[in-house]
Amino acid sequence: MARVFNFSAGPAALPEAVLKQAQEEMLDWHGAGMSVMEMSHRGKEFMSIAEQAEADLRELMAIPDNYKVLFLQGGASSQFAMVPMNLMAEGDEAEYFLTGAWSKKAIAEAKRYGKVNVVADTSDSKFTTLPEEGSVSFSPDADYVHYTPNETIQGIEFNYVPDTGAVPLVADMSSTILSRPIDVSRFGIIYAGAQKNVGPAGLTIVIVRDDLIGGAGDQVPAMMNYATHAENGSMYNTPPTYSWYLAGLVFAWLKGQGGLAKMGEINQRKAAMLYDAIDASDFYNNPVEKPYRSWMNVPFTLADAELDGRFLEEAAAAGLKTLKGHRSIGGMRASIYNAMPEEGVKALVEFMAEFERTNG
Ligand SMILES: *Cc1c(COP(=O)(O)O)cnc(C)c1O
C-alpha cells in the first residue's frame, strides 16, 4: 500500500526522507555493523549521533549558550511535575494560564507542589479565544509563569509570547516546537514531547536556562531533577537512544529544508489554505477566534454531525487518514505539523470540497 497523508495529532507523521534514511541505516549504521538500537549509549558511535543531534537543534532554534538541552523520557506529562519540582520552593507560588486541555493538566499537577494562581482562564469561551497581548499582569513574586503556546486539542495558539518581566516563562511547546523561529531567550524553560513535531514517542526535549537548574529540594528523585540530567549530558541512565537518533535525522532534514524560517512560511501557507476552505463554506466550521487559530492543529465540524462517519470513511479511502477529532471535542481535526507536505493539505481541501458538493 502507498503511504497516506496522516493527519494524526500524535504520534504524528514523520518526513518520508527520514524514514527511508532510518531504513537504510537500520541493520548497519555507518559501518558499525549494528543498528543504532543495539549500540551502547556511551560508545563513540552513539555519542557522535547524540552530539550532532544537539548541535543541529541548537543551530535550528538558535539556542543561546546559557541554556542546556536535555533529552529525557516521560513525555510532556512528566514535565508538568518536573517544572514545579525544580522551580517551586515549598510554600511558594507559580502562575498559570488556563487556555485548554493541556494547560488544565499542567495546573492540576503543579497544585501538588505549591500554590497555583490562574492568571487567565478562557474556559468560559470553551477555549476558543485567548487573553489579548498585554492584558494579563504577573506577580513579581511568582517562581515562574507557565503557559501552553499551542493547545493541541482545541487548536488554539498564542500569536505572541507573554512578557513576564524577570519572572521565568515556562512553555509547553509539545505541538508547536520547530514550527517557526522563536526567540529562546524569552523563555526560562521550553519543553516538548517529541511525538508531535520532533520524532518518535519516547523522547522529551527540555531546553532550560542554566540559572533554573539546581533548585530542586533533597526530596526530589534524581530522575526528576534537571541537575542530574544536565550534569550527565542526559546520560545519567540509559536515554531513549533510537528516538534521539531519529530526532537527529529530523533536525538534519529541517536544516536541509531551509531551517525554521522556511518551515514557518510553509506552515503558515498550509494553515491558511485549510482555514480559507473552512471559512469559505457554510458546511464546515472552526470555532476559534481568527488571530488565535493554530497553525498546527485544525479542528473543524461538519454542518451535520450525522455525516462524520461517512466523511472519515471516504477520506480514509482517499488516502487521508486520522482526521477524527479528539473525543472531548468531536468533529474532525487535521494536524499539519512540519512533516505534512503542502500537497497533503491541498488533497484534504479538495476532498472537503467534493464531500460538500455530494453531501452538503
Ligand atoms: C501531547 C501533548 C502533551 C502530552 O504529551 P505526552 O508526551 O504524551 O506526555 C502535553 N502537552 C501538549 C501541548 C501536547 O500536545
Image (cartoon, grey):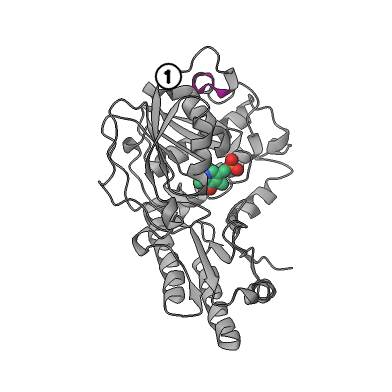
Looking at the picture, tell me which residue is in the foreground, 310 or 242: 310
Residue shown at the point (60%, 73%) measured from the top left: 305
The magenta stretch is: 224-228
Q: Is 103 positioned to the left or the right of 291 in the image?
A: right
**Residue 198 visible to an observer of this rendering:** no
Residue shown at the point (31%, 30%) measured from the top left: 167
**Residue type for callout 1:** Gly
Is residue 227 found inside the magenta-colored segment of the image?
yes
Furthest residue in direction top, as rendered: 218
Q: Quadrant of the N terminus?
A: bottom right
User: Is residue 266 depicted above or below 142 in this figure?
Assistant: below
User: Is residue 319 depicted above or below 133 in this figure?
Assistant: below
Point out residue 308 in the picture as x, y percentages from the top left corner: 63, 72
Q: Is 346 positioned to the left or the right of 265 in the image?
A: right
The kind of secondary structure the magenta stretch mainly shows is helix
Point out residue 354 in the picture as x, y percentages from the top left corner: 57, 84
Residue shown at the point (59%, 22%) measured from the top left: 223
Q: Is 30 positioned to the left or the right of 279 in the image?
A: right
Q: Secondary structure at mark 1?
A: loop
Furthest residue in direction bottom, as rendered: 358
Mark 1 neighbour class, 10 Å CA radius: few under 14, some 14 to 19, many 20 or more:
few
Tell me where residue 234 sits by quadrant.
top right
Give the labeled residue for mark 1.
91
Looking at the picture, tell me which residue is in the foreground, 214 or 69: 214
Q: Quadrant of the C terminus?
A: bottom right
Point out residue 300 in the picture as x, y percentages from the top left corner: 52, 68
Looking at the picture, tell me which residue is in the foreground, 328 or 152: 328
**Residue 265 visible to an observer of this rendering:** yes
